[in-house]
Image (cartoon, grey):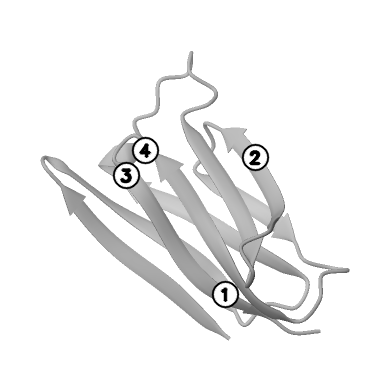
Amino acid sequence: MDTVKNHYSRGCSFFVFTVYPNPASEAIHVRMEGESRKVPTDNPGYYTKGMHDENGNPVWEKETDSQEEHIPTTGWKEGIYHVRLHHPEGNFAQKVIVRH
C-alpha cells in the first residue's frame, strides 16, 4: 500500500494533500497539511471533499473544516476512484484504487 502526497504552492500558501492507502480495501484517509490548515472556525464549508467513481459519478461528499477525513469504502465496487478537494486555493484530485 502506498501513500500519495501532492505538494501544492499557490502564492504565499503551501500545503500537502495526502491520500492513503492506495490501493484501499476498507477505507481511504485524506489529510491536508500546511498553511491552508489555518481554517476559520466560523466557516464550516471551507472544504468540500468528494469521491467519484471512474465514470465521474459521486459516491461520497462532505463539506467540512476538518483537515482529515476517513472515508469508508466497504461495499463499493472495486475500481478506480478520484478523491476531489474543492478549496479556496483551488481544486485538486487524486486517483485511488479500491480493492477488496
Q: Secondary structure at mark 2?
A: strand
Q: Residue 53: x and y, percent? A: 66, 67
Disc with the residue nearer the chain's start (1 vs 2): 2
Against 74, residue 36 (above or below) is: above
Return the residue at label 2: 62
Return the residue at label 4: 37
Return the residue at label 3: 90
| Numbered tag placed on residue 85 in the rendering | none
Q: What amino acid does circle 2 point to?
A: Lys
Disc with the residue nearer the chain's start (1 vs 4): 4
Q: Residue 5: x and y, percent? A: 38, 69
Instruction: Write the residue at 68% across / 59% down.
Output: 57
Label 2 crowd bin: few (<14), some (14–19), many (20+), radius 10 Å = few
Q: Residue 47: x and y, percent? A: 48, 36
Q: What amino acid does circle 3 point to?
A: Gly
Q: Which quadrant would the N terminus be assigned to in this image?
A: bottom right
- Viewer-nearest of discs 1 and 4: 1
CB within 8 Å, label 3 to label 4: no
Q: What amino acid does circle 4 point to?
A: Arg
Instruction: Write the residue at 34% across / 31% down.
Output: 38
Return the residue at label 1: 96
In front of the other: 11 or 53: 53
Label 1 crowd bin: few (<14), some (14–19), many (20+), radius 10 Å = many
